[in-house]
Image (spheres, rainbow, N blue to C red):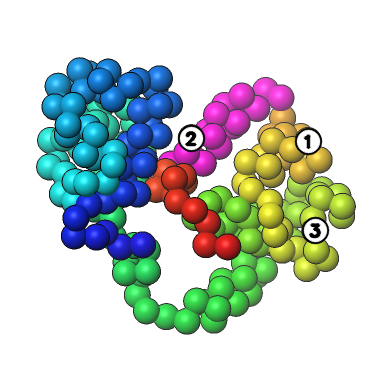
Amino acid sequence: MSKSPSGNKPFGKIVASLRREKSLTQEDLSEKTSLDYDTIVNIENGRRARIESDILLNLADTFRLTSRERKEFFAAAIDISDERVVTKSKSEEILKRVLAMTEQIRLPVFVFDAYMDVVFANSVILTLLEVPENFVETADSKWSGYNVMRVVFDPKSGYKDLVGNENWDEVAISNIHLFRVATLRNQTRQRPF
């Protein structure tokens, strides 16, 4: 989805979502950021096509975004669609090459999409996690419908056993942060299917 000349609705939804996550009203956000209430409303409603860098930094500070979250937040503010960022290519052909390469890698590999849904897991990770056959939907290792968070937290996946109880809290929190960063720009968008 590319930005319309009159506004940026996807970014507005992200700001509203982050505001609600902090249990703030629009008035509270206006107060905390020292931004005019109408500015907050216009951003959230997608009526602001261009948002100045000082406003973006102010919002990121107020939401206490990490450095990686800020990067995604700022990228969402300019709302250039992935289709326009990525060079033109045949996606099916590239996916086939990536999947073939992952089978040659002797390290555990997951391939996931922008929503962190696993689209492929190589045989090394399946063996390492000792994934039971009934956990994987299809015999060819395509994990249709499995999100990275499910792989991390589902007791049947074997991930927690691999990490061990001593490091589990740190690893779990790290995976949650990774998920939040990776999906920030897509949290408020509808999936294409």
Q: Which residues are magenta?
A: 165-181
Residue hosting label 1: 155
Residue 142, quarter of the rendered image? bottom right
* Residue 175 percent location from the top left of the image: 55, 37
Cα–Cα span, label 1 and label 3: 16 Å
Q: First in sequence, mark 2 or 3: give its number.
A: 3
Amino acid, disc 3: Glu
Q: Residue at x 64, y 48 (%)?
A: 147
Asked if the residue at tag 2 contacts the one at tag 1, i.e. Cβ–Cβ closer than 8 Å, the answer is: no
Q: Give the structural element (helix, strand or loop) at label 2.
A: helix
Q: Which is nearer the eye, 70 or 163?
A: 70
Is residue 156 placed above or below 101 in the rendered structure? above
Q: Is residue 87 magenta?
A: no
Q: Give the structural element (helix, strand or loop) at label 3.
A: loop
Q: Residue at x 72, y 30 (%)?
A: 164
Residue hosting label 2: 177
* Residue 37 percent location from the top left of the image: 18, 26
Q: Is residue 170 magenta?
A: yes
Q: Residues within 10 Å of mark 1 (few under 14, many from 20)?
A: few
Q: Residues within 10 Å of mark 2 (few under 14, many from 20)?
A: some
Q: First in sequence, mark 1 or 2: give its number.
A: 1
